Image (cartoon, rainbow, N blue to C red):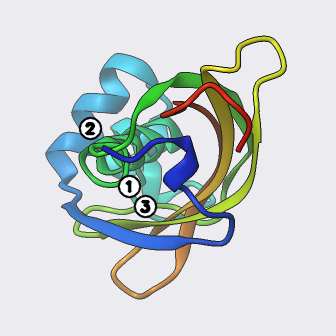
Amino acid sequence: MRYYEDIEIGETETFGEYHVTKDEILAFAEQYDPQPFHTDEAAAEDSAFGQLVASGWHTASICMRLLVDGPMQDRAGMGARGVDELRWHQPVTPGDTLSIRTEVLEKCVSESDPTRGYVDTKLEGINQNGEVVISWIGLEMVARRNSGAE
């Protein structure tokens, strides 16, 4: 288990591989983001995208899954305080394969609860061509191994 004290500013990791299918794009969009360029191939061809694209929320959900299955699996995580700077850089299309890259940007001990620390990590979702498709900064809470000073 990796605790707050084990995490270093600047550490980077790359994780996962997730193949995105047309059926999955359609199913997610029908339930959560039913805009025509996510749910209708013909309408998507006439959109600014020129083809069917995944909802940005679907892309975020895929990357969150990769994050949980990857770097968060061995971390003493306590949830998150939020997400900053969420950006969709380019669309995800059927057949894309996504992975994630993370970089620890900042960390500090909680002033109100010395048993936890705050770790701010940049996440980038990367497609099979090495292009960033989504990014955000996660504001994670991580348990401390010790509650005393670092």
Percent position of residue 133, x then y: 54, 65
Mark 1 = which residue? 52
Q: Is residue 122 left or right of residue 68?
A: right
Pick whichever, 149 or 85, lies toward us.
149
Mark 3 = which residue? 92
Q: Give the residue type that dot 1 points to.
A: Leu
Percent position of residue 72, x then y: 36, 44
Q: Nearer the viewer, mark 3 or mark 2?
A: 3
Check the picture and name the quadrant holding the C terminus.
top right
Percent position of residue 41, x then y: 32, 50
Distance from label 1 to label 2 (Cα)? Answer: 9 Å
Distance from label 3 to label 2 (Cα)? Answer: 13 Å
Furthest-front residue in this view: 148
Circles 1 and 2: CB atoms closer than 8 Å? yes
- Against 72, is 34 above or below? above
Mark 2 = which residue? 26
Q: Give the residue type that dot 2 points to.
A: Leu
Look at the numbered disc 2 and give the secondary structure of its residue.
helix
Q: Residues within 10 Å of mark 3 (few under 14, many from 20)?
A: many
- Against 126, is 72 above or below? above
- Against 32, is 124 above or below? below
Q: Give the residue type that dot 3 points to.
A: Val
Determine the residue positioned at 76% across, 24% down. Answer: 110
Percent position of residue 116, x then y: 61, 25
Furthest-top residue in this view: 112
Determine the residue positioned at 26% across, 62% down. Answer: 94
Look at the numbered disc 1 and give the secondary structure of its residue.
loop
Q: Is residue 55 left or right of residue 105?
A: left
